[in-house]
Amino acid sequence: MAERLEDILDEGLAVIFCGINPGLMAAAQGHHFAGRNNRFWRTLHLAGFTPEEIHPENDRTILQHGCGLTAVVERPTARADQLSPAEFTAIAQDFEHKIARYAPRFVAFLGKAAYCGLSGQRDVAWGLQPQTFGNAAVWVLPNPSGRNRAFSLDQLVAAYRQLHLMALGQFSVLEEAES
């Protein structure tokens, strides 16, 4: 198994999606969101980020659509709750520098735990956040993991579509505050 999953990043992307950490299947296959029950690629497509559903083995093609991928914590685990608060504290500053270096318009954290772990906040709302991270606007999205059944596919798509429209400049901050 790979010790870390390689980032898929470039400078000036519209959105960098930040998973909490790689799952064991993704790390073993060397591709982001490779678990068979993970809904990331389907959600991304249905929300309008990609014209077709990308297969995990083609994850690098996400760059062609103005998006990138990284994980907050590099260590693969079977479950995100196997990460310790100390792991987030240890990487917080370096992770923020990474985001600043690549300078996306938005950094989208997949799950509240990823953003709370880095920011030190105890609770955050879904969607656009009032503060920036690495000079990028912050958006918190539901985690598309197959283990997260609190959100249906339709709910995931609706949440991701809001970010997509904002990234295209078709969704205003005022509309986000009203929803």
Image: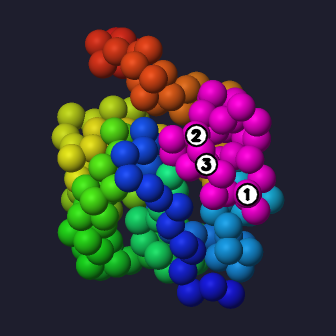
For the C terminus, the quadrant is: top left
Circle 3 sits on which residue? 62
Amino acid type of the residue that numbered disc 1 sits on in the rendered structure: Asn
Q: Is residue 147 visible to the viewer in this orientation of the structure? A: no
Specify the label residue 58 is tagged with. 1
Q: Residue at x 47, y 76 (%)?
A: 74
Residue 166 falls in image quadrant: top left
Circle 2 sits on which residue? 65
Label 2 Cα neighbours within 10 Å, binned few <14 / some 14-19 / many ≥20: few
Tell me whether the residue at label 3 lies in contact with that at label 2, contact meaning CB atoms closer than 8 angstroms: yes
Position in image of residue 66 (x %, y %): 51, 41
Q: Which residues are magenta?
A: 40-67
Residue 26 falls in image quadrant: bottom right
Position in image of residue 148 (x %, y %): 62, 51
Residue 48 within the magenta-colored segment of the rendering: yes
For label 1, the SS is helix
Specify the label residue 6 is tagged with. none
Q: CA distance from mark 1 to mark 2?
A: 13 Å
Q: Residue at x 56, y 87 (%)?
A: 3
Position in image of residue 45 (x %, y %): 69, 35
Position in image of residue 127 (x %, y %): 39, 33
Label 3 Cα neighbours within 10 Å, binned few <14 / some 14-19 / many ≥20: some
Q: Residue at x 51, y 56 (%)?
A: 69
Earlier along the polypeptide chain: callout 1 or callout 2? 1
For label 2, the SS is helix
For label 3, the SS is helix
Q: CA distance from mark 1 to mark 3?
A: 8 Å
